[in-house]
Protein backbone atom coordinates (compact mmCIF):
# COMPACT_ATOMS: atom_id res chain seq x y z
CA UNK A 1 0.00 0.00 0.00
CA UNK A 2 1.61 3.32 -1.00
CA UNK A 3 2.41 5.90 1.63
CA UNK A 4 0.05 8.89 1.51
CA UNK A 5 2.54 11.72 1.85
CA UNK A 6 4.14 13.46 -1.11
CA UNK A 7 7.36 13.28 0.88
CA UNK A 8 7.36 9.55 0.52
CA UNK A 9 7.37 9.46 -3.27
CA UNK A 10 10.26 7.38 -4.43
CA UNK A 11 10.69 5.95 -0.96
CA UNK A 12 13.13 3.07 -0.98
CA UNK A 13 12.69 0.51 1.72
CA UNK A 14 14.51 -2.68 2.35
CA UNK A 15 12.85 -5.29 4.56
CA UNK A 16 15.30 -7.37 6.54
CA UNK A 17 14.86 -10.31 8.86
CA UNK A 18 17.35 -9.65 11.64
CA UNK A 19 18.76 -12.53 13.59
CA UNK A 20 18.69 -11.98 17.32
CA UNK A 21 22.45 -12.19 17.44
CA UNK A 22 22.95 -10.22 14.24
CA UNK A 23 23.91 -6.58 13.74
CA UNK A 24 22.51 -4.20 11.12
CA UNK A 25 24.77 -1.48 9.74
CA UNK A 26 23.32 0.37 6.73
CA UNK A 27 25.64 0.65 3.76
CA UNK A 28 28.04 3.56 3.98
CA UNK A 29 27.49 4.17 7.68
CA UNK A 30 28.90 2.98 10.95
CA UNK A 31 26.90 2.18 14.06
CA UNK A 32 27.80 0.87 17.49
CA UNK A 33 24.20 -0.29 17.99
CA UNK A 34 23.30 -3.87 17.27
CA UNK A 35 19.57 -4.20 16.47
CA UNK A 36 18.08 -7.38 17.84
CA UNK A 37 14.41 -7.32 16.84
CA UNK A 38 13.29 -9.25 13.75
CA UNK A 39 11.45 -7.98 10.68
CA UNK A 40 12.87 -4.46 10.64
CA UNK A 41 12.37 -2.05 7.75
CA UNK A 42 15.16 0.30 6.74
CA UNK A 43 14.01 3.68 5.39
CA UNK A 44 16.80 5.35 3.44
CA UNK A 45 15.27 8.38 1.67
CA UNK A 46 16.93 11.70 2.60
CA UNK A 47 16.80 15.32 1.46
CA UNK A 48 19.10 18.29 1.97
CA UNK A 49 18.41 19.67 5.43
CA UNK A 50 19.54 23.20 4.54
CA UNK A 51 21.21 23.51 7.92
CA UNK A 52 18.87 21.06 9.71
CA UNK A 53 19.78 17.49 10.67
CA UNK A 54 17.12 15.04 11.75
CA UNK A 55 13.95 13.16 10.82
CA UNK A 56 10.61 14.34 9.49
CA UNK A 57 7.49 12.83 7.97
CA UNK A 58 3.84 12.12 8.65
CA UNK A 59 1.99 9.80 10.99
CA UNK A 60 -1.19 8.33 9.56
CA UNK A 61 -3.75 5.69 10.45
CA UNK A 62 -2.99 2.64 8.34
CA UNK A 63 -6.65 1.85 7.67
CA UNK A 64 -7.98 4.71 5.55
CA UNK A 65 -4.71 6.68 5.68
CA UNK A 66 -6.19 9.54 7.73
CA UNK A 67 -3.52 11.79 9.33
CA UNK A 68 -3.00 11.30 13.05
CA UNK A 69 -3.00 14.55 15.01
CA UNK A 70 -1.62 14.72 18.54
CA UNK A 71 0.66 11.69 18.29
CA UNK A 72 4.28 11.51 19.36
CA UNK A 73 7.28 10.12 17.51
CA UNK A 74 9.87 8.37 19.68
CA UNK A 75 13.49 7.86 18.68
CA UNK A 76 15.49 4.93 20.09
CA UNK A 77 19.22 4.37 19.40
CA UNK A 78 18.92 0.61 19.98
CA UNK A 79 16.47 -2.10 21.00
CA UNK A 80 17.74 -2.77 24.52
CA UNK A 81 14.45 -1.36 25.89
CA UNK A 82 12.42 -3.45 23.43
CA UNK A 83 11.20 -0.09 22.02
CA UNK A 84 9.19 0.42 25.20
CA UNK A 85 9.48 3.05 27.87
CA UNK A 86 11.20 6.43 27.59
CA UNK A 87 12.98 7.13 24.32
CA UNK A 88 16.18 9.09 23.77
CA UNK A 89 14.31 11.72 21.74
CA UNK A 90 10.62 12.56 21.35
CA UNK A 91 8.78 14.88 18.98
CA UNK A 92 6.26 17.59 19.66
CA UNK A 93 2.65 16.42 19.09
CA UNK A 94 1.98 15.78 15.41
CA UNK A 95 0.12 18.54 13.56
CA UNK A 96 -3.37 18.32 12.08
CA UNK A 97 -1.90 16.83 8.91
CA UNK A 98 0.07 14.26 10.95
CA UNK A 99 3.42 15.92 10.27
CA UNK A 100 6.37 15.94 12.68
CA UNK A 101 10.01 16.98 12.70
CA UNK A 102 12.80 16.08 15.15
CA UNK A 103 16.35 17.44 15.26
CA UNK A 104 18.82 14.59 15.83
CA UNK A 105 22.57 14.10 15.81
CA UNK A 106 23.87 11.85 13.02
CA UNK A 107 23.35 8.18 13.76
CA UNK A 108 21.15 5.13 13.18
CA UNK A 109 17.81 5.07 14.98
CA UNK A 110 14.56 3.18 15.48
CA UNK A 111 11.55 5.45 14.80
CA UNK A 112 8.25 4.71 16.58
CA UNK A 113 4.92 6.57 16.61
CA UNK A 114 2.31 6.42 19.37
CA UNK A 115 -0.81 8.26 20.44
CA UNK A 116 -2.39 7.71 23.83
CA UNK A 117 -5.99 8.79 24.00
CA UNK A 118 -5.23 10.34 27.40
CA UNK A 119 -3.02 12.84 25.57
CA UNK A 120 0.03 11.79 27.56
CA UNK A 121 3.36 11.49 25.77
CA UNK A 122 4.47 8.60 28.00
CA UNK A 123 3.07 5.63 29.86
CA UNK A 124 1.60 2.23 28.99
CA UNK A 125 -0.60 1.87 25.94
CA UNK A 126 -4.25 0.94 26.36
CA UNK A 127 -7.03 -0.29 24.05
CA UNK A 128 -7.93 2.48 21.61
CA UNK A 129 -4.43 3.99 21.58
CA UNK A 130 -2.41 4.05 18.35
CA UNK A 131 1.05 2.56 17.91
CA UNK A 132 3.59 1.56 15.27
CA UNK A 133 5.91 -0.72 17.25
CA UNK A 134 5.20 -3.62 14.92
CA UNK A 135 6.87 -1.69 12.09
CA UNK A 136 10.35 -1.46 13.69
CA UNK A 137 11.46 1.20 11.25
CA UNK A 138 15.17 2.05 11.16
CA UNK A 139 16.70 5.10 9.53
CA UNK A 140 20.19 6.58 9.38
CA UNK A 141 20.49 10.33 9.93
CA UNK A 142 23.37 11.96 8.07
CA UNK A 143 24.93 15.31 8.93
CA UNK A 144 23.04 18.11 7.18
CA UNK A 145 20.38 15.72 5.88
CA UNK A 146 16.76 15.00 6.77
CA UNK A 147 15.59 11.40 6.78
CA UNK A 148 12.01 11.13 5.49
CA UNK A 149 10.05 8.64 7.57
CA UNK A 150 6.26 8.29 7.31
CA UNK A 151 4.74 6.11 10.03
CA UNK A 152 1.54 4.08 9.66
CA UNK A 153 -0.15 3.31 12.99
CA UNK A 154 -2.90 0.94 14.06
CA UNK A 155 -5.33 1.01 16.96
CA UNK A 156 -4.52 -1.24 19.91
CA UNK A 157 -7.36 -3.72 20.39
CA UNK A 158 -6.00 -5.58 23.41
CA UNK A 159 -4.40 -4.32 26.62
CA UNK A 160 -0.64 -4.22 27.01
CA UNK A 161 0.64 -7.67 27.87
CA UNK A 162 2.20 -6.36 31.06
CA UNK A 163 -0.34 -4.07 32.71
CA UNK A 164 1.75 -3.08 35.73
CA UNK A 165 5.33 -2.17 36.48
CA UNK A 166 7.47 -5.20 35.74
CA UNK A 167 9.94 -4.61 38.59
CA UNK A 168 9.56 -4.26 42.33
CA UNK A 169 13.10 -3.29 43.26
CA UNK A 170 12.34 -3.45 47.01
CA UNK A 171 11.98 -7.21 46.96
CA UNK A 172 14.80 -9.42 48.27
CA UNK A 173 13.27 -12.52 46.70
CA UNK A 174 13.34 -13.53 43.07
CA UNK A 175 15.02 -15.23 40.13
CA UNK A 176 18.23 -14.40 38.28
CA UNK A 177 18.62 -15.98 34.86
CA UNK A 178 19.46 -15.65 31.20
CA UNK A 179 17.55 -15.78 27.92
CA UNK A 180 19.42 -17.65 25.19
CA UNK A 181 18.70 -18.99 21.74
CA UNK A 182 19.06 -22.60 20.62
CA UNK A 183 22.81 -22.13 20.05
CA UNK A 184 23.35 -20.67 23.52
CA UNK A 185 23.77 -17.07 22.36
CA UNK A 186 22.22 -14.41 24.61
CA UNK A 187 18.86 -12.87 23.70
CA UNK A 188 18.77 -9.20 24.77
CA UNK A 189 15.63 -7.07 24.98
CA UNK A 190 13.30 -9.87 26.07
CA UNK A 191 11.12 -10.65 29.08
CA UNK A 192 10.88 -13.62 31.41
CA UNK A 193 7.43 -14.26 32.90
CA UNK A 194 6.58 -16.03 36.14
CA UNK A 195 3.31 -17.82 36.97
CA UNK A 196 2.25 -19.24 40.30
CA UNK A 197 0.70 -22.31 38.66
CA UNK A 198 1.00 -24.34 35.49
CA UNK A 199 -2.01 -22.61 33.88
CA UNK A 200 -0.04 -20.13 31.79
CA UNK A 201 -2.62 -19.08 29.21
CA UNK A 202 -3.15 -15.69 30.84
CA UNK A 203 -1.35 -12.55 31.84
CA UNK A 204 1.77 -13.41 33.85
CA UNK A 205 1.72 -12.98 37.59
CA UNK A 206 5.17 -11.38 37.49
CA UNK A 207 7.50 -10.19 34.75
CA UNK A 208 11.23 -9.59 34.64
CA UNK A 209 13.45 -6.68 33.84
CA UNK A 210 14.40 -6.45 30.16
CA UNK A 211 17.21 -8.88 29.42
CA UNK A 212 20.52 -7.10 28.88
CA UNK A 213 23.21 -7.58 26.23
CA UNK A 214 24.21 -10.86 27.90
CA UNK A 215 20.60 -12.06 28.07
CA UNK A 216 20.50 -11.61 31.86
CA UNK A 217 17.19 -10.87 33.58
CA UNK A 218 15.81 -10.56 37.11
CA UNK A 219 12.30 -11.34 38.32
CA UNK A 220 11.49 -9.75 41.69
CA UNK A 221 8.94 -11.75 43.67
CA UNK A 222 6.95 -10.95 46.82
CA UNK A 223 7.46 -14.38 48.40
CA UNK A 224 9.00 -17.80 47.95
CA UNK A 225 7.32 -20.70 46.21
CA UNK A 226 7.32 -22.64 42.97
CA UNK A 227 7.11 -20.55 39.80
CA UNK A 228 6.52 -21.59 36.20
CA UNK A 229 8.55 -19.57 33.72
CA UNK A 230 8.18 -18.53 30.10
CA UNK A 231 9.96 -15.90 28.00
CA UNK A 232 9.28 -13.84 24.91
CA UNK A 233 10.24 -10.66 23.07
CA UNK A 234 7.12 -8.55 22.64
CA UNK A 235 5.16 -7.06 25.53
CA UNK A 236 1.68 -7.17 24.07
CA UNK A 237 -0.67 -9.63 22.39
CA UNK A 238 0.07 -13.32 22.01
CA UNK A 239 3.22 -14.47 20.17
CA UNK A 240 3.14 -14.49 16.41
CA UNK A 241 4.61 -17.37 14.38
CA UNK A 242 8.38 -17.05 14.27
CA UNK A 243 8.63 -14.77 17.33
CA UNK A 244 11.26 -16.03 19.81
CA UNK A 245 9.44 -17.76 22.67
CA UNK A 246 10.39 -20.20 25.38
CA UNK A 247 8.99 -22.28 28.24
CA UNK A 248 10.89 -23.77 31.15
CA UNK A 249 10.04 -27.45 31.49
CA UNK A 250 10.12 -27.55 35.30
CA UNK A 251 9.01 -24.97 37.90
CA UNK A 252 11.68 -23.01 39.76
CA UNK A 253 11.76 -23.26 43.56
CA UNK A 254 12.39 -19.92 45.24
CA UNK A 255 13.07 -19.41 48.96
CA UNK A 256 11.87 -16.28 50.74
CA UNK A 257 14.72 -13.76 51.05
CA UNK A 258 16.83 -15.46 48.37
CA UNK A 259 17.27 -15.42 44.60
CA UNK A 260 17.22 -18.57 42.51
CA UNK A 261 20.23 -18.34 40.19
CA UNK A 262 21.52 -19.62 36.87
CA UNK A 263 18.08 -20.18 35.37
CA UNK A 264 18.33 -20.39 31.58
CA UNK A 265 15.32 -20.15 29.26
CA UNK A 266 15.86 -21.17 25.65
CA UNK A 267 13.89 -19.17 23.09
CA UNK A 268 12.92 -20.71 19.75
CA UNK A 269 10.64 -19.48 16.94
CA UNK A 270 7.01 -19.72 18.08
CA UNK A 271 5.23 -22.40 16.04
CA UNK A 272 1.66 -22.00 17.32
CA UNK A 273 -1.22 -20.27 15.58
CA UNK A 274 -1.90 -16.58 16.09
CA UNK A 275 -5.24 -15.05 17.04
CA UNK A 276 -5.32 -11.26 16.96
CA UNK A 277 -6.20 -9.56 20.24
CA UNK A 278 -5.68 -12.63 22.43
CA UNK A 279 -3.31 -10.82 24.73
CA UNK A 280 -4.44 -12.82 27.76
CA UNK A 281 -3.24 -16.02 26.08
CA UNK A 282 0.55 -15.82 25.87
CA UNK A 283 0.69 -19.04 23.83
Image (tube, grey):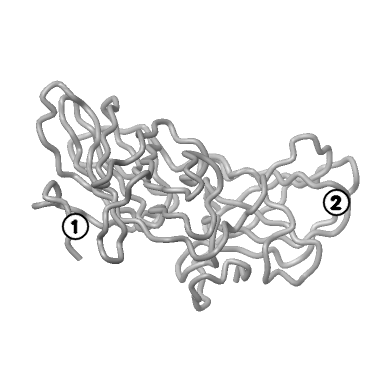
Q: Which is more toward the observer, 140 or 70?
A: 70
Front one among 269 and 68: 68
Looking at this view, name the residue that lies furthest to the right: 256
Marks 2, 1: nearer the viewer:
1
Residue visible at 81% across and 62% down? 196
Q: Residue furthest top?
A: 51
Q: Horizontal and vertical percent for residue 247? A: 65, 65
Question: Picture quarter containing residue 78?
Answer: top left
Label 2 or label 1, whichever comes before in sequence order: 1
Count of all numbered marks drawn on residues in the image:
2
Secondary structure at numbered mark 2 = strand
In the image, residue 36 sits, relative to residue 155, either above or below, namely above
Residue 79 at x, y percent in the picture: 44, 43
Q: Give residue 3's mark.
A: 1
Quadrant containing the N terminus in the rendered view: bottom left
Indicate the quadrant where residue 94 lies: top left
Mark 1, Cα crowd under 10 Å, few <14 / some 14-19 / many 20+, is some
Q: Residues within 10 Å of mark 2 (few under 14, many from 20)?
A: some
Q: Residue shown at 39%/34% (left/top)?
A: 90
Question: Is residue 280 or residue 274 the one in the foreground?
Answer: 280
Q: Is residue 195 above or below residue 97?
A: below
- State the residue at coordinates (23%, 33%): 141
* Image x and y of residue 147, in percent: 20, 38
Tell me: residue 222, above or below residue 268: above
Q: Work out which quarter of the rendered image holds the C terminus and state it.
A: bottom right
Position of 260 with respect to 191 (left or right) is right
Q: Which residue is mark 2?
A: 254
**Which residue sits at x=55%, y=53%?**
184
* Residue 65 found in image quarter: bottom left
Q: Position of residue 281 (x, y in %)?
A: 62, 71
Q: Which of these two is toward me, 271 or 117?
A: 117
Amino acid sequence: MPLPSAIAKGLFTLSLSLLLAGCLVPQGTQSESCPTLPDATVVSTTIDGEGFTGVQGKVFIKKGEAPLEGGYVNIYPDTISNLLGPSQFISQPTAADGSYRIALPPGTYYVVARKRMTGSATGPLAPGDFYSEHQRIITTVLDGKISLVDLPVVSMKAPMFFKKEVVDSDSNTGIHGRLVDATGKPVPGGFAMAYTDATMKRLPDYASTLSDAEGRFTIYLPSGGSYYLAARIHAWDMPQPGEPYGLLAQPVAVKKGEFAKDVAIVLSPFSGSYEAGKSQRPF
